[in-house]
Image (cartoon, rainbow, N blue to C red):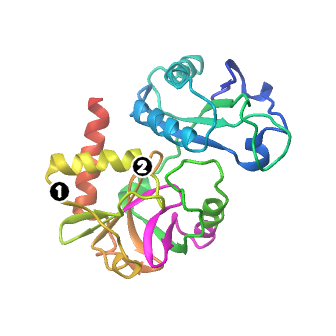
Amino acid sequence: MHFPIAFFNGQYLPKQEISISPDDRGFLFGDGTYEVVRIYHGKPFRLHRHIERLRYSTEAIRIPFSNFNQIEELAYTLIQKNELPHGEAILYIQITRGVAPRSHSFPLNTSPTVYACLFPVPDFSKQRKEGVRAILVPDLRWQRCDIKSISLLANVLASQEAIERHAHEAIFVRNGWITEGTHTNVCRVVKGILQTPPLNGHLLNGITREVILELCHTLKIPVEEVPISETAFTQSEEILILGTITEIMPVIAVNDIQIGNGKPGPITQKLQNAFNELLSSE
């Protein structure tokens, strides 16, 4: 499916007509923030939470953008202009610091560049049903992974390594402790308890992670937000990776070590069913 209309600095334009200045700090430095929102049945899922997180990230790196009320309007306008009243898509939103002479330090009066577009949803239904492989890689990123920054080189390289090693995702390990995947949060199940690393500067506050923790409360699945060692991780009964595009994905092997019986586990399946029911009701 093709979505030709995008948003750029207050205008809705055919994507091929949009041009970005070579002096934009997003292009030169990766100086910006972004959000990825899933659209189900023509409606953005948990849009307000994504906007809150975009505000948090943008304020954290001191980009002078305040018109966050615009984000909801542009989301629904893009859905309408791309003729997607009841369909599925992914909404991408990016805010950079804008155009300025190249310098590591930034001027305080730049006009932010705002870009948004839709793109198709990849079909991961087979992977969600059968499970995927993951690899562990050293977490070489900076200390503020709670900010959803467009500076993603470490994630890009780790994700490419996963593909080249015939895995679906690369999961970061920092000083012996699991943090998150290149584009997912991570959970494991041990003795019927769902465990996930606690929020800190080393991982993102994932929206799907929030939803899953809410569903665990509803389903009376015990939850622990605790550090998870690399050794304990590979001894899990179940492993799940969570994300806007990924949704709830079972991991059946890590570094060629089988997880559980090598099939998606019962808690994973219970959460997948509850998540699908939630989508049908919202």
Horizontal arrangement in the rendering, residue 166 relative to residue 204 (left or right): right
The crowding category of the residue bearing disc 1, from other C-alpha atoms within 10 Å (few below 14, some 14 to 19, many at least 20), is some
Label 2: which secondary element: loop
Is residue 54 rendered magenta in the image? no
Distance of mark 2 from mark 1, alpha carbons? 19 Å
Q: Image point 46% across, 80% down: which residue?
A: 256
Q: Are marks 2 and 1 in contact (CB under 8 Å)?
A: no
Q: Position of residue 279 (x, y in %)?
A: 32, 35
226, 116: nearer the viewer: 226
Q: Position of residue 168 (x, y in %)?
A: 51, 63
Q: Which residue is mark 1?
A: 221
In the rendering, which numbered label is found on residue 119?
none
Q: Quadrant of the N terminus?
A: top right
Q: Position of residue 42 (x, y in %)?
A: 44, 25
Magenta segment: 161-186
Q: Earlier in the sequence, mark 2 or mark 1?
A: 2
270, 211: nearer the viewer: 211
154, 15: nearer the viewer: 154
Q: Image point 49% across, 23% down: which residue?
A: 72
Horizontal arrangement in the rendering, residue 193 relative to residue 104 (left or right): left
Type of amino acid at the residue the image marks with label 1 = Ile
Label 1: which secondary element: loop
Q: Quadrant of residue 197?
A: bottom left
Horizontal arrangement in the rendering, residue 177 relative to residue 3 (left or right): left
Q: Position of residue 192 (x, y in %)?
A: 18, 67
Q: How many marks?
A: 2
121, 238: nearer the viewer: 238
Type of amino acid at the residue the image marks with label 2 = Gly
The crowding category of the residue bearing disc 2, from other C-alpha atoms within 10 Å (few below 14, some 14 to 19, many at least 20), is many
Is residue 166 rendered magenta in the image? yes
Q: Which residue is mark 2?
A: 206
Q: Quadrant of the C terminus?
A: top left
